[in-house]
Image (cartoon, rainbow, N blue to C red):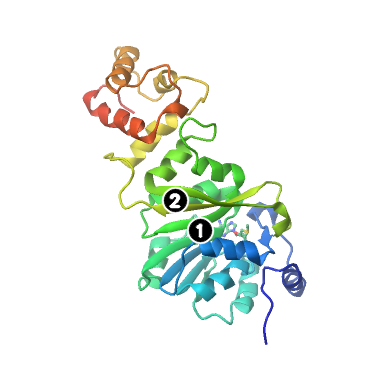
Amino acid sequence: MDIKDIATPSRTKALLNQYGFNFKKSLGQNFLIDVNIIHNIIDASDIDENTGVIEIGPGMGSLTEQLAKSAKKVIAFEIDQRLIPVLKDTMSPYDNVTVINEDILKANIAQYVSDNLADCDKIMVVANLPYYITTPILLNLMQQRLPIDGYVVMMQKEVGERLNAQVGTKAYGSLSIVAQYYTETSQVLTVPKSVFLPPPNVDSIVVKLMKRDVPQVEVDNEDKFFKMTKSAFSQRRKTINNNYQSLFVEGKNKKEVILKWLETSGIDPRRRGETLSIKEFANLYNELKNFPELEF
Ligand code: SAM
Protein backbone atom coordinates (compact mmCIF):
# COMPACT_ATOMS: atom_id res chain seq x y z
CA MET A 1 0.00 0.00 0.00
CA ASP A 2 1.28 3.44 -0.87
CA ILE A 3 1.06 5.58 2.26
CA LYS A 4 0.65 9.31 1.80
CA ASP A 5 3.54 11.58 2.76
CA ILE A 6 3.31 12.94 6.31
CA ALA A 7 3.96 16.45 4.99
CA THR A 8 0.46 16.82 3.56
CA PRO A 9 -2.45 18.58 5.24
CA SER A 10 -4.62 15.44 5.18
CA ARG A 11 -2.10 12.97 6.66
CA THR A 12 -0.86 15.47 9.26
CA LYS A 13 -4.43 16.20 10.37
CA ALA A 14 -5.24 12.49 10.47
CA LEU A 15 -2.21 11.86 12.72
CA LEU A 16 -3.15 14.79 14.98
CA ASN A 17 -6.62 13.30 15.40
CA GLN A 18 -5.41 9.75 15.83
CA TYR A 19 -3.07 10.73 18.67
CA GLY A 20 -5.16 13.58 20.09
CA PHE A 21 -2.09 15.77 19.69
CA ASN A 22 -2.24 19.49 20.40
CA PHE A 23 0.61 21.83 19.44
CA LYS A 24 2.82 23.37 22.10
CA LYS A 25 3.75 26.85 21.05
CA SER A 26 6.46 26.95 23.72
CA LEU A 27 8.29 24.14 21.88
CA GLY A 28 8.16 25.92 18.52
CA GLN A 29 5.88 23.28 17.04
CA ASN A 30 5.02 24.30 13.48
CA PHE A 31 4.87 21.22 11.30
CA LEU A 32 5.58 21.20 7.58
CA ILE A 33 2.64 20.23 5.39
CA ASP A 34 4.21 20.78 1.97
CA VAL A 35 6.37 17.99 0.63
CA ASN A 36 7.85 20.21 -2.13
CA ILE A 37 9.58 22.37 0.48
CA ILE A 38 11.00 19.21 2.02
CA HIS A 39 12.31 18.03 -1.34
CA ASN A 40 13.98 21.43 -1.82
CA ILE A 41 15.63 21.12 1.58
CA ILE A 42 16.86 17.63 0.80
CA ASP A 43 18.14 18.60 -2.64
CA ALA A 44 20.19 21.40 -1.07
CA SER A 45 21.66 18.97 1.47
CA ASP A 46 23.52 16.80 -1.08
CA ILE A 47 22.56 13.68 0.82
CA ASP A 48 23.39 10.26 -0.58
CA GLU A 49 23.28 6.66 0.59
CA ASN A 50 26.53 7.15 2.54
CA THR A 51 25.38 10.24 4.43
CA GLY A 52 24.45 10.30 8.09
CA VAL A 53 21.91 12.91 9.13
CA ILE A 54 21.27 14.58 12.46
CA GLU A 55 17.77 16.00 12.66
CA ILE A 56 16.59 18.30 15.43
CA GLY A 57 12.90 18.20 16.22
CA PRO A 58 11.38 15.57 13.92
CA GLY A 59 7.85 16.39 15.10
CA MET A 60 5.66 13.71 13.52
CA GLY A 61 8.35 12.77 11.01
CA SER A 62 7.48 14.85 7.93
CA LEU A 63 11.10 15.65 7.08
CA THR A 64 12.49 12.52 8.77
CA GLU A 65 10.73 10.11 6.41
CA GLN A 66 12.14 11.86 3.32
CA LEU A 67 15.59 11.94 4.91
CA ALA A 68 15.30 8.23 5.66
CA LYS A 69 14.64 7.57 1.97
CA SER A 70 17.80 9.38 0.81
CA ALA A 71 20.35 8.99 3.61
CA LYS A 72 22.21 6.05 5.10
CA LYS A 73 21.07 6.79 8.65
CA VAL A 74 19.14 9.45 10.50
CA ILE A 75 19.34 10.28 14.20
CA ALA A 76 16.54 12.58 15.29
CA PHE A 77 16.39 14.42 18.64
CA GLU A 78 12.86 15.18 19.81
CA ILE A 79 12.21 16.76 23.22
CA ASP A 80 8.44 16.20 23.31
CA GLN A 81 7.67 12.81 24.80
CA ARG A 82 4.14 12.89 23.33
CA LEU A 83 5.65 12.62 19.84
CA ILE A 84 7.62 9.45 20.54
CA PRO A 85 4.71 7.00 20.00
CA VAL A 86 3.71 8.95 16.88
CA LEU A 87 7.25 8.67 15.48
CA LYS A 88 7.40 4.98 16.40
CA ASP A 89 4.38 4.49 14.19
CA THR A 90 5.31 6.83 11.31
CA MET A 91 8.94 5.71 11.17
CA SER A 92 8.14 1.98 11.36
CA PRO A 93 8.76 1.47 7.60
CA TYR A 94 12.34 2.79 7.99
CA ASP A 95 15.02 0.80 9.79
CA ASN A 96 17.65 3.53 9.41
CA VAL A 97 16.02 6.07 11.76
CA THR A 98 16.88 6.40 15.46
CA VAL A 99 14.67 8.71 17.48
CA ILE A 100 16.21 10.10 20.66
CA ASN A 101 13.86 11.61 23.22
CA GLU A 102 16.22 14.30 24.51
CA ASP A 103 16.70 18.03 24.56
CA ILE A 104 19.22 18.81 21.80
CA LEU A 105 20.85 21.41 24.04
CA LYS A 106 21.55 18.80 26.72
CA ALA A 107 22.20 15.63 24.73
CA ASN A 108 25.68 14.18 24.38
CA ILE A 109 25.66 14.56 20.62
CA ALA A 110 29.29 13.50 20.16
CA GLN A 111 28.48 10.16 21.80
CA TYR A 112 25.35 9.61 19.69
CA VAL A 113 27.28 10.45 16.55
CA SER A 114 30.09 8.03 17.32
CA ASP A 115 27.61 5.30 18.34
CA ASN A 116 25.35 5.69 15.31
CA LEU A 117 27.02 7.52 12.44
CA ALA A 118 30.65 6.38 12.58
CA ASP A 119 30.26 4.39 9.35
CA CYS A 120 28.91 7.33 7.35
CA ASP A 121 31.16 9.18 4.89
CA LYS A 122 29.56 12.53 5.57
CA ILE A 123 27.38 13.97 8.33
CA MET A 124 24.79 16.68 7.69
CA VAL A 125 22.44 18.44 10.08
CA VAL A 126 19.08 18.85 8.38
CA ALA A 127 16.17 20.32 10.29
CA ASN A 128 13.17 22.53 10.54
CA LEU A 129 14.47 23.98 13.78
CA PRO A 130 12.48 24.96 16.87
CA TYR A 131 12.81 28.72 16.24
CA TYR A 132 12.95 29.79 19.88
CA ILE A 133 16.39 28.17 20.26
CA THR A 134 17.87 28.42 16.76
CA THR A 135 20.94 30.39 17.83
CA PRO A 136 21.94 28.27 20.86
CA ILE A 137 21.45 25.08 18.83
CA LEU A 138 23.69 26.21 15.99
CA LEU A 139 26.35 27.78 18.22
CA ASN A 140 26.43 24.69 20.38
CA LEU A 141 26.84 22.37 17.38
CA MET A 142 29.47 24.51 15.66
CA GLN A 143 31.54 25.25 18.74
CA GLN A 144 31.63 21.64 19.90
CA ARG A 145 33.72 20.81 16.86
CA LEU A 146 31.62 17.76 16.06
CA PRO A 147 32.40 15.84 12.87
CA ILE A 148 29.59 17.65 11.04
CA ASP A 149 30.19 18.56 7.39
CA GLY A 150 27.33 20.96 7.01
CA TYR A 151 23.89 22.20 7.93
CA VAL A 152 20.75 22.83 5.91
CA VAL A 153 18.35 24.33 8.36
CA MET A 154 15.07 26.20 8.38
CA MET A 155 14.69 29.07 10.81
CA GLN A 156 13.17 32.47 11.36
CA LYS A 157 14.08 34.78 8.47
CA GLU A 158 15.86 37.40 10.58
CA VAL A 159 18.16 34.85 12.18
CA GLY A 160 18.98 33.28 8.81
CA GLU A 161 19.81 36.72 7.44
CA ARG A 162 22.16 37.35 10.34
CA LEU A 163 24.00 34.08 9.77
CA ASN A 164 24.49 34.93 6.13
CA ALA A 165 25.07 38.69 6.45
CA GLN A 166 27.91 40.49 4.71
CA VAL A 167 30.04 43.06 6.49
CA GLY A 168 28.56 46.56 6.45
CA THR A 169 24.94 45.43 6.42
CA LYS A 170 22.38 45.90 9.17
CA ALA A 171 22.11 42.16 9.81
CA TYR A 172 25.88 41.71 10.26
CA GLY A 173 26.94 41.02 13.81
CA SER A 174 28.57 38.58 16.21
CA LEU A 175 26.38 35.68 15.00
CA SER A 176 27.51 36.27 11.37
CA ILE A 177 31.10 36.17 12.56
CA VAL A 178 30.80 32.88 14.46
CA ALA A 179 28.90 31.21 11.59
CA GLN A 180 31.26 32.47 8.90
CA TYR A 181 34.35 31.65 10.95
CA TYR A 182 33.42 27.96 10.88
CA THR A 183 31.32 27.69 7.73
CA GLU A 184 30.49 29.05 4.29
CA THR A 185 26.96 30.32 4.44
CA SER A 186 24.31 30.68 1.75
CA GLN A 187 20.59 31.16 1.54
CA VAL A 188 18.66 28.24 0.01
CA LEU A 189 15.08 29.51 -0.09
CA THR A 190 12.49 31.61 1.65
CA VAL A 191 9.44 29.81 2.90
CA PRO A 192 5.87 31.12 3.15
CA LYS A 193 3.92 30.75 6.41
CA SER A 194 1.24 28.76 4.61
CA VAL A 195 3.35 25.57 4.44
CA PHE A 196 3.14 25.04 8.20
CA LEU A 197 0.50 23.80 10.56
CA PRO A 198 -0.12 25.94 12.52
CA PRO A 199 1.37 28.85 10.51
CA PRO A 200 4.09 30.62 12.51
CA ASN A 201 3.98 34.36 13.24
CA VAL A 202 7.28 34.95 11.48
CA ASP A 203 8.69 34.41 8.00
CA SER A 204 11.07 31.53 7.44
CA ILE A 205 14.21 30.87 5.51
CA VAL A 206 16.38 27.85 4.76
CA VAL A 207 20.10 28.44 5.17
CA LYS A 208 23.02 26.22 4.19
CA LEU A 209 26.24 26.29 6.20
CA MET A 210 29.12 24.15 4.92
CA LYS A 211 32.04 23.60 7.25
CA ARG A 212 35.33 25.14 6.13
CA ASP A 213 38.37 22.84 6.07
CA VAL A 214 40.10 25.38 8.26
CA PRO A 215 38.44 28.36 9.96
CA GLN A 216 38.41 31.57 7.98
CA VAL A 217 41.02 33.23 10.21
CA GLU A 218 43.61 31.99 12.66
CA VAL A 219 43.20 32.81 16.34
CA ASP A 220 44.64 30.96 19.35
CA ASN A 221 41.52 31.00 21.50
CA GLU A 222 38.12 30.94 19.78
CA ASP A 223 36.08 31.66 22.90
CA LYS A 224 38.12 34.78 23.60
CA PHE A 225 38.01 35.84 19.98
CA PHE A 226 34.20 35.57 19.91
CA LYS A 227 33.94 37.40 23.22
CA MET A 228 36.00 40.20 21.70
CA THR A 229 33.94 40.37 18.51
CA LYS A 230 30.66 40.26 20.44
CA SER A 231 31.71 43.18 22.55
CA ALA A 232 32.19 45.35 19.42
CA PHE A 233 28.42 45.05 18.84
CA SER A 234 27.26 45.46 22.43
CA GLN A 235 25.86 48.87 21.53
CA ARG A 236 25.51 48.92 17.79
CA ARG A 237 25.36 52.71 17.46
CA LYS A 238 28.57 53.20 19.40
CA THR A 239 32.03 53.25 17.88
CA ILE A 240 34.36 50.33 18.30
CA ASN A 241 36.51 52.46 20.59
CA ASN A 242 33.55 53.17 22.87
CA ASN A 243 32.38 49.58 22.97
CA TYR A 244 35.85 48.33 23.78
CA GLN A 245 36.13 50.61 26.81
CA SER A 246 33.78 48.26 28.63
CA LEU A 247 35.45 45.02 27.47
CA PHE A 248 38.84 45.47 29.10
CA VAL A 249 39.50 45.46 32.83
CA GLU A 250 40.43 48.78 34.35
CA GLY A 251 44.13 49.62 34.15
CA LYS A 252 46.61 52.43 33.85
CA ASN A 253 46.06 54.65 30.78
CA LYS A 254 43.41 52.23 29.50
CA LYS A 255 41.94 54.76 27.08
CA GLU A 256 45.27 55.55 25.47
CA VAL A 257 46.30 51.91 25.27
CA ILE A 258 43.04 50.99 23.51
CA LEU A 259 43.59 53.77 21.00
CA LYS A 260 47.16 52.65 20.42
CA TRP A 261 46.03 49.06 19.94
CA LEU A 262 43.37 50.08 17.39
CA GLU A 263 45.85 52.31 15.57
CA THR A 264 48.56 49.62 15.41
CA SER A 265 45.96 47.21 13.99
CA GLY A 266 45.02 49.73 11.30
CA ILE A 267 41.49 50.29 12.63
CA ASP A 268 40.06 53.81 12.80
CA PRO A 269 38.63 54.08 16.36
CA ARG A 270 35.58 55.93 15.01
CA ARG A 271 34.43 52.93 13.02
CA ARG A 272 31.47 50.85 14.15
CA GLY A 273 31.67 47.10 14.72
CA GLU A 274 29.44 46.35 11.74
CA THR A 275 32.07 47.77 9.34
CA LEU A 276 34.82 45.37 10.43
CA SER A 277 35.42 42.19 8.48
CA ILE A 278 36.30 38.94 10.21
CA LYS A 279 39.88 39.35 9.01
CA GLU A 280 40.06 42.81 10.61
CA PHE A 281 38.69 41.40 13.88
CA ALA A 282 41.28 38.64 13.74
CA ASN A 283 44.05 41.20 13.20
CA LEU A 284 42.80 43.12 16.22
CA TYR A 285 42.68 39.97 18.30
CA ASN A 286 46.14 38.81 17.24
CA GLU A 287 47.60 42.26 17.92
CA LEU A 288 46.47 41.98 21.54
CA LYS A 289 49.56 39.92 22.31
CA ASN A 290 51.54 43.16 21.98
CA PHE A 291 49.27 44.83 24.53
CA PRO A 292 49.40 42.59 27.60
CA GLU A 293 47.88 45.37 29.71
CA LEU A 294 44.60 44.94 27.80
CA GLU A 295 42.99 42.08 29.70
CA PHE A 296 39.49 40.67 29.49
N1 SAM B 1 10.40 18.51 11.73
C1 SAM B 1 8.99 18.71 11.99
C2 SAM B 1 8.35 19.33 10.77
O1 SAM B 1 9.07 20.02 10.03
O2 SAM B 1 7.16 19.12 10.54
C3 SAM B 1 8.76 19.59 13.23
C4 SAM B 1 9.48 20.91 13.25
S1 SAM B 1 8.98 21.97 14.54
C5 SAM B 1 9.38 23.55 13.83
C6 SAM B 1 10.24 21.87 15.79
C7 SAM B 1 10.32 20.54 16.56
O3 SAM B 1 11.38 20.63 17.51
C8 SAM B 1 9.09 20.17 17.37
O4 SAM B 1 8.75 18.83 17.11
C9 SAM B 1 9.51 20.35 18.84
O5 SAM B 1 8.84 19.50 19.74
C10 SAM B 1 11.00 20.04 18.74
N2 SAM B 1 11.82 20.65 19.80
C11 SAM B 1 11.61 21.81 20.46
N3 SAM B 1 12.59 22.06 21.34
C12 SAM B 1 13.48 21.03 21.23
C13 SAM B 1 14.70 20.69 21.89
N4 SAM B 1 15.21 21.50 22.81
N5 SAM B 1 15.33 19.54 21.56
C14 SAM B 1 14.79 18.72 20.60
N6 SAM B 1 13.64 18.98 19.95
C15 SAM B 1 12.99 20.12 20.25
Seen in the picture, residue 103 relative to 291 is either above or below; the reply is below
Based on the displayed image, in which of its 4 quarters is residue 267 positioned?
A: top left
Are circles 2 and 1 on residues that touch, CB within 8 Å? yes
The percent coordinates of residue 227 (x first, y second) are 39, 35
Residue indicated by mark 1: 104
Q: Is the CB of mark 1 within 8 Å of ligand 1?
A: yes
The percent coordinates of residue 191 (x first, y second) are 65, 53
Label 1 crowding class (10 Å Cα cut-off): few <14, some 14-19, many 20+? many
Q: Quadrant of the N terminus?
A: bottom right
Q: Nearer the viewer, residue 96 or 255?
A: 96
- Position of 6 with respect to 98 (left or right) is right
Based on the displayed image, in which of its 4 quarters is residue 34 positioned?
A: bottom right
Label of residue 140 in the image: 2
Number of marks in the rendered image: 2
- Position of 258 with respect to 40 (left or right) is left
Q: Nearer the viewer, residue 48 or 293?
A: 48
Q: Amino acid at mark 2?
A: Asn
Seen in the picture, residue 171 relative to 53 is either above or below; the reply is above
